[in-house]
Each structure stands twice: as C-alpha cells, then as structure tokens.
C-alpha cells in the first residue's frame, strides 16, 4: 500500500515541522517582536524536534541524541513568553533557567556515545528497543527528569498567566482583548502532550511493541499542537502583535506596592468619597476604555494611591469597582421601557461594555441572570 502507517506519520511530521518553522520565522522577523521572540523559539524548537524525529525514524536512531535535549527548551520558552506580558526578562534569569539543560546535555552525551560506540551511528530505533531499553537506568532517570522539567515549567507558566490576569483586573475596566485565556488553553494542551510523552515512556514496561505506537501518537499530537497555535495566530492577532503587553509603568512591581503612599484613615475616606462622587457624577464607567490611570488623573493622585483606596477601603479591585456601576446602569436601561426597542448588545454598549460576551459574563456574575433573562423578568 502507498500509505502505510509509518509513511503517514512521516508525512505528518514533515507538515508539522514545516508549519512550525514558517510560523516561528514569521514571529522572529516581525517588527517589535519583544517577548514574542520566545514564542518564535518555542515553535522553531518544535519544528526541530519534529524534523529530527523524522530523521530518527527514517534514517538512524542516533539523530535522537541531537534532538532529545531540545525538549528542555520548550518549557523555558513558554514560560518566558508568558511572563513577558507583564515583566522584564533579564540575562541572569535566562542563565538560571538554562542550568538543567546544560546538565542534561552532559549526561545524555555521555550515555549516547556509550551506546553508539557499542552499536554504531547507524543504530536503528527498532534495534534499540529490542536491546532491552528499559534496563538502562540512566535513560530512565533522564526521561523522568525531562517530564518533571516540562511539568515544572507548565506550572510556572500557569502561575505567570494568573498573575498577569490579576494585574489586568487592577488596572483595566475591560479585559476582553487583554486576557491570556488562550495561553491557559495552550498550557493545558501542552500538559496533555506531556501526559502522552509519559505514556510513551512507560509503555515499554508493558509491551515493547507499544513504544513506537505511543511515540508516533505523541509526535502526531505535537503537530496538531502547532496548528492550534497557528489557528490562534490568525484569529487573535493582537496576542502575536504584542498589543496586549503591559508596559512597566502600568504594572508596579509587588515590592513597590503603595510604597509612595502612607495614607491615614481620614485621608483614605476622603479619597474614597471623591472617587465615588466622581464616578457617579461624571459617569466615567460609561467609557469602555476606562483605565485606572484615567481615574487617577481625574482625582489628581497616583495610580498606586487610587489602587490602595479601591482595594483597602472600598474592598474591590478596579475592574470590579467599575463594572458594578456598569451592571447597575445596564439594569436601569433594561428596565426602562423606552429602551425596549434596542437589542442586548446596544444596551451593553450604552452601559460601558465593549462586547456582548463581556456584557453577558459580567452581568450574570453580579445578578445571577443573563441580560435578556433579567429584562424578561422586569416585564410585568
């Protein structure tokens, strides 16, 4: 048959590698790439892994010695890409996160040359499996270390993504285009790949025939993973253009929180009343692009002080504070018979929301009902 199982997997590997290289190079050479360079490296690394796996399957097992350490670049690249949205990446941080890779390469090189000296450079993967692969304790240790490394950086990336979203809630009243939910889904998909990798490793202890099946599945899913990223590149270009990166002056470092302010209770109460009166008199919440910087300018205070008053005195972050007003405004509009001719989106836009999704999600969070259901409940 023309399309055997191995032939099909080789085509998948080639297409995945090609897509990875194209998308990675586009990101690499795009102007103003900033921290997106790490996503480019992430994709190019996947491309090298897929292409190396293709050579490993079709030419010789020894090519695996070259590509295997590349897996340890994936975690740090993903992590640096995520933290780049709201923080700086220093040289010392890069060096610190490369230590495990250097150690791994050293151990793998020693082991690989031990095997190659015994069997030769043309040693095939199938022959290697038959040589009682599972008895090589050093290789088992390396595999466990590799999986642990990927899990560690996945956890760091999730924590960085959550930190970024918490920062957004402090400084913006609308985060629809700024959130990194797609990055969270990316990390979850990455974790699924790690699980398959672990299965392909443990499969040998059940049956040596299974290892090639799981390895092929793992590589095929890695290709799907690349096309998943490409899909988001087309549908959410703001993420890849760097438009949602927070600048350093927008996000204060945790150690600098409120360091410039020492407000006593009386001053805090005065500022709270001033902020509340301003929001209600000028209806600043109707501006969909309202940020804490704008509010701070209105009350002639620093962002740090306004953030402190909102969090410590009012008990809400900026996002919650503004959107409570918007929800109340929307409730009034939905109850007003003179606006019954407008659709739900129009009501949401009038209340300060910038999308139907944001309106529905936030409104239901505070009322327990969608805007349309709430409107129906007010019709007597």
Image: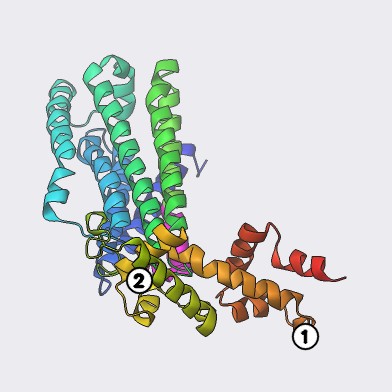
State the extent of the magenta-drawn residues as a range: 226-243
Q: Residue 275 occupies which quadrant of the picture?
A: bottom left
Q: Badge 2, how many Cα within 10 Å: few under 14, some, many 20+?
A: some
Classify residue 329 by image quadrant.
Answer: bottom right
Give the class, few, some or many, for how many residues have Cα within 10 Å of label 1's Cα (few <14, many ≥20): few
SS for dot 1: helix
Dots 2 and 1: beta carbons under 8 Å?
A: no
Q: Magenta segment, principal secondary structure?
A: helix
- Residue 241, numbered circle: 2
Q: Is residue 216 above or below residue 78?
A: above
Q: Which residue is mark 1?
A: 338
**Relative to 6, does residue 36 appear above or below in the rendering?**
below
Residue at the right extreme, as displayed: 380
Nearest the eye: 240 or 139 = 240
Please indicate whether residue 323 sits to the left or right of residue 247 in the image.
Answer: right
User: x, y (%) of residue 246?
Assistant: 32, 67
Name which residue lies at 44% across and 31% down. Answer: 214
């Amino acid at each position: 048959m023309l399309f055997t199982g191995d032939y099909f997997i080789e085509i998948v590997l080639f297409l995945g590698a090609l897509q990875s290289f194209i998308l990675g190079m586009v990101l690499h050479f795009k102007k103003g790439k900033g921290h997106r360079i790490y996503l480019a490296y992430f994709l190019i690394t996947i491309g090298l892994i897929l292409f190396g796996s293709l050579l490993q399957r079709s030419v010789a097992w020894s090519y695996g010695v070259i590509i295997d350490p590349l897996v340890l670049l994936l975690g740090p690249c993903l992590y640096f890409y995520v933290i780049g949205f709201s923080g700086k990446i220093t040289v010392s941080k890069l060096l610190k996160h490369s230590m495990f890779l250097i150690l791994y390469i050293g151990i793998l090189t020693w082991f690989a040359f031990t095997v190659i000296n015994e069997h030769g450079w043309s040693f095939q993967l199938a022959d290697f499996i038959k040589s009682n692969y599972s008895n090589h304790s050093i290789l088992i240790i390396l595999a466990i270390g590799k999986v642990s490394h990927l899990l560690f950086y996945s956890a760091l990336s999730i924590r960085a993504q959550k930190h970024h979203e918490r920062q957004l809630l402090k400084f913006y009243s609308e985060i629809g285009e700024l959130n990194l939910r797609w990055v969270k889904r990316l990390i979850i998909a990455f974790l699924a790949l790690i699980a398959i990798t672990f299965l392909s490793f443990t499969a040998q202890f059940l049956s040596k025939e299974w290892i090639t099946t799981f390895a092929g599945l793992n590589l095929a899913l890695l290709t799907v993973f690349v096309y998943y990223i490409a899909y988001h590149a087309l549908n959410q270009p703001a993420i890849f253009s760097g438009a949602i990166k927070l600048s350093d002056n927008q996000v204060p470092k945790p150690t600098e929180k409120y360091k410039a302010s020492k407000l006593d209770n009386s001053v805090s109460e005065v500022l709270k009343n001033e902020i509340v009166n301003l929001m209600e008199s000028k209806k600043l919440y109707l501006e969909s692009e309202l940020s804490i910087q704008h509010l701070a300018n209105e009350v002639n205070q620093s962002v740090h002080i306004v953030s402190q008053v909102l969090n410590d005195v009012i008990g809400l972050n900026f996002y919650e504070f503004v959107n409570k007003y918007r929800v109340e405004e929307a409730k009034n509009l939905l109850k007003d018979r003179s606006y019954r001719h407008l659709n739900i989106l129009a009501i949401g836009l009038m209340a300060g929301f910038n999308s139907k999704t944001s309106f529905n999600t936030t409104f239901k969070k505070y009322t327990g009902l969608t805007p349309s259901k709430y409107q129906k409940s007010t019709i007597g």
